[in-house]
Amino acid sequence: MPEPTTIDEILDFAIEREQEAADFYNELAGTMATPAMQGAFRQFAKEEMGHKAKLQGVKAGKKLAGAAKAVQDLKIGDYLVDVAPTPDMDYQKALIIAMKREKASYRLYMDLAARVPEGEVNKVLVELANEEARHKLRFETEYDEHFLTEN
């Protein structure tokens, strides 16, 4: 797909990315060993579908609330080695993949926001970037609690 340039193309691109993210988290949920881990990733898939619905609403002309303040970044994911998803992956690897995906989604929305003029679409893109940053923070916090905290 060529690089999106119009507001409609940017919204369509973002809508597609949210669907891909939801599909990814649903697929990841199916590989988790415990119901709690499956449920956590299914919840993230639902949130990504919520993002998709927001973007579709904006495209249809719906006005949404403005962007929230910036989200704390623990930067844990910044220092972890990339891992590829596998059918038998453990929870630690799944969290690493999720952190890195959310960081990439944050950057994507900030880059897209920089391409559109100030206004409704810009605000929604910044808001979605902040939501992706909150997701990353939740994954980082989970990783910290399970894998970095000394017992």
Image (cartoon, grey):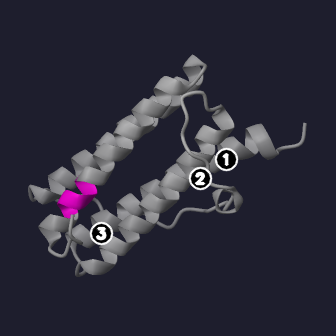
From the viewer's side, name the closer residue of 149 and 120: 149
Q: Is residue 89 above or below residue 63?
A: above
Instruction: Tell me the crowding category of disc 3: few under 14, some 14 to 19, or many 20 or more residues within 10 angstroms, Cα based.
Output: some
Instruction: Tell me the mark number nearer the camera, choosing from 1 and 3.
Output: 1
User: Which quadrant would the C terminus be assigned to in this image?
Assistant: top right
In the shown orientation, is residue 114 left or right of residue 24?
Answer: left
Regarding residue 52, the answer to whether it shows in the image is yes
Q: Residue at x 60, y 27 (%)?
A: 88
Q: Quadrant of residue 14?
A: bottom left
Q: Which residue is mark 2?
A: 137
Distance CA(mark 2)–CA(mark 3): 21 Å
| Amino acid at dot 2 | Leu
Callout 3: helix, strand or loop? helix
Q: Is residue 41 above or below residue 62?
A: above
x and y, in percent, of residue 21 in the image: 38, 45
Q: Residue at x 56, y 25 (%)?
A: 32
Regarding residue 67, the answer to whether it shows in the image is no
Instruction: Tell me the crowding category of disc 1: few under 14, some 14 to 19, or many 20 or more residues within 10 angstroms, Cα based.
Output: some
x and y, in percent, of residue 54 in the image: 24, 51
Q: Which residues are magenta?
A: 11-15
Distance CA(mark 1)–CA(mark 3): 27 Å
In the shown orientation, is residue 34 left or right of residue 60?
Answer: right
- Magenta stretch, main secondary structure, is helix
| Amino acid at dot 3 | Lys
Q: Is residue 38 above or below residue 15?
A: above
Q: Which residue is mark 3?
A: 123
The disc at residue 141 is 1
1 and 2 marks in contact (CB < 8 Å): yes
The disc at residue 7 is none
From the viewer's side, name the closer residue of 68 and 3: 3
Callout 2: helix, strand or loop? helix
